[in-house]
Amino acid sequence: MKTKTNLNIFAALGLALTLASCATANAASGGGTPAPQSEPQTEIQETQDTKAEETAQETEAQTEKKYDNVTVRLGIMGGSDEVVWDPIVAEFAEKGVNIEYVYFSDYTQPNAALDAGDIDLNSFQHYAYLGNEKEKFGYDIDAIGDTLITALNVYSTRVSSVDEIPEDGRIAIPNDAVNGGRALNVLQAAGIIKIEDGKDLTPTVADIAENPKNIEIVEVDASQTASLLPDVDAAVINGGFALDAGLSPINDAIFHDDPSFYKTNSYVNIIAARTADKDNELYKEIVKGYQTDRTKEIYANDFQGLYIAAWDREQPAEGTPEITERTTVKLGIMGGSDEEIWDPVKAEVAKQGIDIEYVFFTDYTQPNAALANGDIDLNAFQHYAYLNDEKANFGYDIESIGDTYITALNLYSTKHKSVDEIPEGGTIAIPNDAVNGGRALRIIQASGLIKLADDDNLTPTVSDIAENPKNINFVEVDASQTVTLLADADAAVANSEFIVDAGFAPRDIAIFIDDPSFYKTNNYVNVIAARSADKDNAVYKEIVKAYQTETTKQVYLDVFQGLYVAAWE
C-alpha cells in the first residue's frame, strides 16, 4: 500500500511541475498572458483527494481482510449450533477466514477429531465432559473460551415469585448428582435454603443447613420435574425439558439460573482447541467474536433464554475441581481395618461425584508397583520411610500427596495412672530395634522422664540418654514382647496393635500419648500416595481434604481406640 501511495504523490507532483513549466515558458517568450493558476491548482487538489480516498479505501479493505483465505474447521453437533455460530462465520468471512462446520452425531467424536488434527476447534461440551475425556483418553486439548450454561430455572404454576412459596411447601428437583446439586445451588441463591458451608460444590438434600420455610424437597428424575408442576409449589427444571413442556425459560420462570451461583466451572460450555494452539491469535479472535452481546441476543431471542452467557461471570477460585461428571478413583489399601477409616471419606466425596473403588492387597510389595504401573490411582498403606525406600530400590515415580497418621507408640502401664507415679529405680520396657527403640526413647523424653544427649539423633539408643533423674531401668525386648512385660514392669512403650491384640484398649492404659510432634522426621508418618504426574490432580486433592477431617480423627479414637494418631496437623 505504501508503494501505491508514493506513486500517487509522484504523479501529482509531476502534473504540478508540468503545469508550472508551461506557465514559465509562456511568460519567458513574451507570449500572451499566463494562464490563471487557480484552475490547475483545483484540478491538482481534486486528483490528490481522489487518490487519497482510493488509497484509504484500499487500506481499510486490507485491514478488514486481515487473513488470506484461511480455513478453520469447527466441530459442532448440528442445527441449533449453527444458529449461534452463523453470525460469527459471516463476520470472519469478511476478514478472509472461512469457518467450516464439521458435523458430528456422537458426543464421543469431536474431541477425538480435535486431538487427531481433523478439526481445529470444537464447541459442544462443558468443562466436566472435557476433563473426563482428557482423563480417559489422554487428549492434549484445552478450553480456550467459555460460551454458555443451559438454564436450570425455578418454575411454578401456583405462585409468581419465590417469596410466595408457602410454609411447608413442596419443590421438585432432579434426583441425579449433577442436576440435583445445581438445583440446590439455585434454591440457595433464591433464598429458599442455605447449604452447609463447604458442601456447595455438588450438594445433596442432606447438606441443607437452613430451611426456614420447612420446604419439602421432592427428588425425581430430571425428565419428570415439569410434569410435577400441578402437584408441587415449584420445580427446578432443565431448560430443554422446560421447552418440551411448553414453558418459556425467560417468561415463565419465577427465578432464573445464573453462572455466578456455582463454585465450579463444570456446568460451563466451552470452545476447545489443541493445547499447542491455545494461544493461536486467530482462535482468540474467534472466541472474542463469539463472546458478544450479539450472541447473548441470540440466546434470548432464538432460544427463549435456554442458554445463558457464561463468559463474563466471576471465575471460581483457582484449583476448584471440575468433577460434576462422576469420576472413579481406584484406591489401593491393605484390607478390613483400612475400609473402616476410608468408608466415611468414600461417602463424603461421593457427594462431589467421586466414586472411590477399593483395590485390596495382601503383600506390602504390591501397592506401589500397581500405582506406578497405573493399575490404581492412589494408595494408602505406608509411611514416608517405606515409600522412600521403595522409590530408591525400584525407581517408582510416585510421591505423597497427603499425610494421614502415625501408628501410636504410647507409654502404657497397668500399675500406674500417670508418668509421675513411676517410682525411683522403676523399670520401663522398650522395643530393641533401632526404629521403634529410637521412637520409644523420644516418647519417654517427651514425657519428662529422661533427656537425650543429641536431640537431632533420629534413632537414639539407651546409651544416648544424658539425664535420667529417676534412674529408670530400661529393658529392651522384641517389639512384640513389650506388652507381655506390663505385668512385671512399671511401664512399657509398645506398638498399639500389640496392645489391642493383648485385649487392652490403648486409651484405657496409656499414661502418655504418642504425637507426631515428638519427632524431627516424617519417617513414621503414613501417607496417601499418587503418581508424581498426578500430584496436583484436583480430584485427588479433594480426597485428601475429605480424609484430613475431625471425622477421621473420631474414627481413629472410636473404632481404633487411639491406635492411630492424626499426623496432618
Image (tube, rainbow, N blue to C red):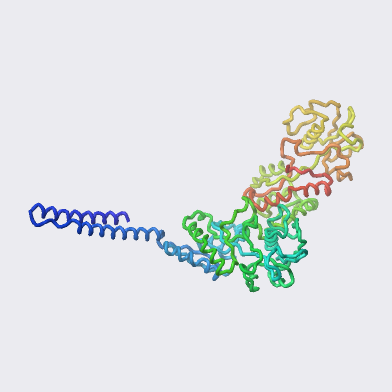
428 to the left or right of 72: right
Q: Is residue 118 visible?
A: no
Q: Position of residue 113 (x, y in %)?
A: 54, 63
Front in this rendered view, residue 260 or 424: 260
Q: Is 236 above or below relative to 321?
A: below
Query: As drawn, which residue projects farthest toward the left?
Result: 30
Q: Is 473 above or below relative to 79?
A: above
Q: Which quadrant is the N terminus positioned in?
A: bottom left
Front in this rendered view, residue 283 or 234: 234
Q: Position of residue 310 (x, y in %)?
A: 58, 59
Q: Position of residue 137 (x, y in %)?
A: 60, 59
Q: Quadrant of residue 79?
A: bottom right
Task: Look at 74% across and 36% down and name the residue there.
Answer: 519
Q: Position of residue 107 (x, y in %)?
A: 59, 66
Q: Is residue 408 visible?
A: yes
Q: Quadrant of residue 203?
A: bottom right
Q: Which quadrant is the C terminus positioned in?
A: top right
Front in this rendered view, residue 390 or 183: 183
Front in this rendered view, residue 121 or 64: 64
150 to the left or right of 230: left
272 to the left or right of 177: left
Q: Is 5 above or below relative to 106?
A: above
